[in-house]
Image (tube, rainbow, N blue to C red):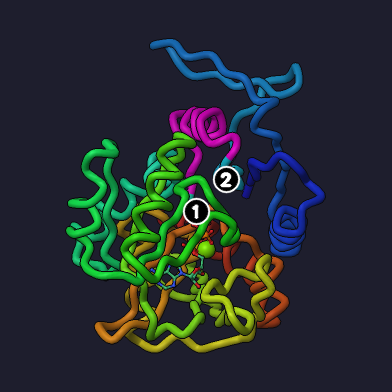
């Protein structure tokens, strides 16, 4: 089969492993920088060029599109879809997952558990907005934040209010959530490929923090998802239309809750923690899907 990987950097661990896995399975594979793809859109057909030459005929395109190039990257991916290539994570599904408010609304509408979340626009509404959530502690999250850097815990209502006011003053986008204390600083990264969780790791916050991000000093160890956790992770990925996703869950008294669905999950941490060939699982899944489409 003929594969393309849309990635800005062929040296990244995840990109290298996917190339290796595809070649190992006898496929041809090429890494294309999405920002060097340019396209012609017309009713008589769709064209794509890459660094001066036409590109076409890919059976599957695997997007590894970073958050900073979401708009252009998904336009390139959509062009490949229109040219007949299969993508396990379609452009529309990536856009759904990247917009956190939209993703929360879609998941909740499908009955998938999430920490209760509120957001609003006008500062005059802050007090009532917080009352819609219930009493503190609250977790306040910048919607553009990542790796735990924009996630704050407030224990008193006055603190929630002043953090919300400060963020509004900075024109930041954020949501406020109920704090899931039972999780005790742990979350579960479930790596979903198709309709199963192929690998899973538990991340634990360092002493004195509630955020389990590895960049915040958290630690990771291999874990097994319970049947309920695996089902929740798969439903969340499928609920957004993703066949490959990293779904972060936290344990609560009312069952597993989804924190995030990542459409471009990194392979390095999870392959190292679990010793499993996630890249091979991804390539085999895509090849199976391409065959079933033919
Ligand atoms: N509502 C919550 N209750 C308890 N702990 C939480 C809650 N939300 C987040 N956490 C903890 O904080 C960590 C960071 O939060 P989150 O994953 O939402 O943000 P992020 O990692 O900065 O962004 P993202 O994962 O969306 O790129 C989580 O891994 C989890 O350990
Ligand atoms: Mg996270």
Report the residue that reaches farthest toward the right.
11
Name the residue: 60% across, 29% down. 56
Closer-to-camera residue (263/164): 164
Which residue corresponds to the image point at 66% horizontal and 28% vertical from the top-left?
35
> Is residue 223 shown left or right of residue 55?
left
* Residue 263 image label: 1
Q: Pointers 1 and 2 in contact (CB under 8 A)?
A: yes
Q: Is residue 26 visible?
A: no
**Residue behind mark 2:** 63
Return the disc, 1 or 2, that comes first in the chain's sequence: 2
Q: Is residue 258 magenta?
A: no
Task: Let me know if residue 43 appears in the view.
Answer: yes
Q: In front: mark 1 or mark 2?
A: 1
Crowd around label 1: few <14 · some 14–19 · many ≥20 (10 Å): many
Q: Nearer the viewer, residue 175 or 23?
A: 175
Q: Residue at 39% of width from left, 11% of height from top?
A: 43
| Residue 262: % across, % down | 49, 57
Whole-percent x and y of residue 252? 33, 82
Q: Quadrant of residue 50?
A: top right
Say few, some or many: other residues with alpha carbon within 10 Å of mark 2 (under 14 / 14 to 19 / 20 or more).
many
- Magenta segment boundaries in residue numbering: 68-87
Q: Could you tell me which secondary element the residue under label 2 belongs to?
A: strand
Q: Picture coordinates of residue 11 (x, y %)?
A: 81, 50
Is most of the magenta stretch helix, strand or loop?
A: helix
Pick the front one: 289 or 219: 219
- Horizontal and vertical percent position of residue 293: 40, 50
Comparing 111 with 49, the one in front is 111
* Horizontal side, residue 271 vs residue 192: left or right: right
Work out how far the residue at label 1 is from the one at label 2, CA to CA, in angstroms: 9 Å
- Residue 73 on the magenta segment: yes
């Amino acid at each position: 089969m003929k594969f393309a990987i849309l990635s800005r950097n062929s040296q990244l661990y995840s990109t290298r492993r996917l190339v290796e896995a595809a070649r190992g399975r006898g496929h041809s594979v090429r890494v294309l920088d999405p920002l060097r793809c340019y396209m012609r859109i017309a009713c008589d057909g769709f064209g794509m060029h890459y660094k001066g030459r036409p590109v076409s005929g890919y059976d599957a395109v695997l997007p590894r599109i970073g958050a900073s190039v979401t708009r252009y990257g998904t336009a390139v991916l959509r062009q490949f879809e229109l040219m007949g290539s299969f993508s396990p994570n379609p452009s529309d599904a990536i856009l759904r997952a990247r917009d956190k408010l939209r993703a929360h609304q879609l998941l909740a509408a499908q009955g998938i558990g999430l920490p209760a979340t509120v957001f609003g626009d006008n500062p005059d509404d802050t007090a009532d907005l917080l009352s819609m959530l219930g009493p503190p502690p609250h977790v306040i999250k910048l919607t553009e934040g990542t790796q735990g850097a924009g996630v704050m815990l407030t224990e008193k209502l006055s603190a929630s209010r002043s953090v919300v006011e400060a963020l509004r003053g900075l024109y930041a986008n954020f949501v406020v959530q109920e704090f899931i204390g039972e999780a005790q600083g742990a979350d579960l990264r479930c790596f979903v490929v198709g309709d199963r969780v192929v690998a899973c790791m538990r991340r634990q916050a360092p002493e004195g923090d509630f955020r389990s991000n590895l960049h915040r000093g958290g630690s990771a160890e291999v874990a097994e998802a319970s049947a309920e956790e695996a089902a929740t992770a798969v439903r969340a990925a499928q609920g957004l239309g993703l066949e490959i996703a990293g779904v972060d869950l936290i344990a609560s008294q009312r069952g597993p809750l989804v924190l995030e669905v990542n459409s471009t999950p990194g392979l390095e941490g999870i392959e190292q923690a679990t010793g499993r060939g996630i890249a091979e699982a991804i390539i085999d899944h895509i090849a199976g899907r391409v065959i079933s489409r033919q």
